[in-house]
């Protein structure tokens, strides 16, 4: 196995697949990256932890074909530190050892037998459709941060991906907050009218990091989903289980609606959070005429007080919420104006993008004992 490749190209390729490398060493070979040199295709990179797999093709001058698995951490660090010049890559496939030569540097690194590396799963009799990448990235980015870390409730550690008539909907919740986003797009399915699957949070993170181009081709069966775009393929296991009925907690009415400049609110919440996180990390919000008043909970550590101008329809309101939950959503939406709908102190706060209906974010109130 022998090829020449630019250091920059190899390092960027490794970066694209390495997040799928296994962290735990239950199978040591999964801590490596599979490399395959093909004269007609270039250099093929694969990483997988058996839940998520990423493969990527890079242009390279292939002199001799072959394959090997190389420990990801050592390989990444080594390639990163090499000069930005052409690398000569040679692999001894009997000893499973590679030699990297670049400028006046030369390094040897032990690898694994490529025949022991698991193949990425096939998608059996899949549903198949295409989606615009910009819109898919938007709806994923707007909800992914709201997934749960509680492994005892697997369905909540991912996001519901659903096709409904002429819409694609994606929803995340940890039961204390909920994020809902949609795009106007109809897809044609062979075997059913709707598609309802749960995508792992890790898969969603990698999609927002890697998606590029205009369109992504998606294949889905009962166990896996595959995304193909540009020169990258992502394959992910789906989460089994039933996603909670999110519609039951989404308010269909409100008593008061506020319109507020997102950046002003974000900056005020960020400052108030510096004090709030010293104690319970909660903020007390209340409206007085055309002002939104933000106070941190009273604490021996200190106190924060902010006031910002708002447009308000309805009576004054107050609510206590988790500061982090509000700050999280203000980081991911980029509309200049947002709206906040309130019912009362014991009901969820609903945040939207101005008067648009393509995004809804709920924060449950914090109840004081």
Image (cartoon, grey):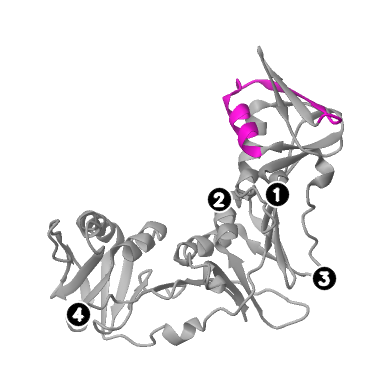
**15 is higher (above) or lower (below) than 214:** above
- Residue 74 drawn in magenta: yes
| Magenta region | 72-95
The residue under the point 29% across, 57% down is: 263
How far is disc 3 from disc 2 in space, using C-alphas?
Answer: 28 Å
Query: Which residue is the site of mark 2?
Result: 209
> Which marked residue is nearer to the observer: mark 4 or mark 1?
1
Q: Is residue 173 left or right of residue 98?
A: left
Query: Which residue is the site of mark 1?
Result: 27
Q: Quadrant of residue 194?
A: bottom right
How far is disc 2 from disc 1 in space, using C-alphas?
Answer: 26 Å
Q: Residue furthest front?
A: 26
Query: Which residue is the site of mark 4?
Result: 317
Indicate which disc, 4 or 2, sits on the residue closer to the N terminus: 2
The residue under the point 22% across, 56% down is: 278
Q: Is label 3 in a helix, a strand or a loop? A: loop
Q: Is label 1 in a helix, a strand or a loop? A: loop
**59 is higher (above) or lower (below) than 305:** above
**5 is higher (above) or lower (below) than 232:** above
How far is disc 3 from disc 4 in space, using C-alphas?
Answer: 53 Å
**Few, some or many residues within 10 Å of mark 3 (<14, 14–19, 20+):** few
How far is disc 4 from disc 1 in space, using C-alphas?
Answer: 55 Å
Indicate which disc, 4 or 1, sits on the residue closer to the N terminus: 1
Q: Tag on residue 140?
A: none
């Amino acid at each position: 196995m022998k090829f020449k490749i630019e250091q920059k190209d190899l390092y960027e390729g490794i970066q694209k697949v390495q997040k799928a490398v296994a962290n735990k060493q239950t199978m040591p070979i999964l801590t490596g990256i599979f490399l395959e040199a093909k004269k007609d295709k270039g250099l093929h990179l694969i990483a997988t932890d058996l839940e998520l797999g990423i493969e990527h093709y890079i242009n390279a001058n292939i002199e001799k074909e072959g394959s090997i698995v190389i420990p990801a951490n050592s390989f990444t660090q080594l390639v990163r530190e090499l000069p930005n010049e052409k690398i000569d890559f040679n692999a001894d496939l009997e000893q499973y050892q590679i030699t990297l030569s670049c400028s006046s540097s030369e390094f040897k690194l032990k690898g694994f037998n490529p025949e022991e590396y698991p193949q990425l799963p096939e998608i059996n009799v899949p549903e198949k459709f295409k989606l615009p990448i910009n819109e898919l990235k938007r709806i994923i980015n707007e909800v992914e941060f709201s997934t749960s870390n509680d492994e005892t409730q697997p369905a909540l550690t991912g996001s519901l991906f659903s096709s409904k008539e002429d819409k694609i909907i994606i929803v995340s919740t940890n039961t204390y907050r909920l994020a809902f986003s949609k795009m106007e797009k109809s897809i044609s399915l062979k075997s059913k009218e709707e598609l309802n699957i749960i995508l792992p949070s890790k898969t969603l993170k990698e999609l927002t990091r890697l998606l590029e181009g205009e369109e992504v081709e998606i294949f889905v069966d009962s166990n896996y989903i595959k995304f193909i775009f540009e020169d990258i393929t992502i394959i992910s296991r789906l989460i089994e289980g039933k996603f909670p009925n999110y519609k039951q907690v989404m308010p269909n009415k409100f008593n008061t609606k506020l319109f507020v400049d997102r950046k002003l609110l974000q900056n005020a919440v960020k400052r108030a959070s510096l004090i709030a996180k010293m104690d319970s990390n909660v903020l007390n919000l209340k409206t007085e005429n055309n002002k939104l008043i933000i106070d941190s909970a009273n604490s021996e550590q200190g106190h924060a007080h902010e006031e910002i101008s708002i447009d308000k329809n309805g009576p004054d309101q107050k609510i206590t919420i988790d500061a982090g939950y509000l700050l999280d959503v203000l980081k991911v939406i980029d509309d200049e104006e947002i709206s906040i709908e309130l019912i009362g102190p014991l009901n969820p706060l609903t945040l939207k993008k101005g008067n648009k209906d393509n995004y809804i974010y709920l924060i449950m109130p914090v109840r004081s004992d």
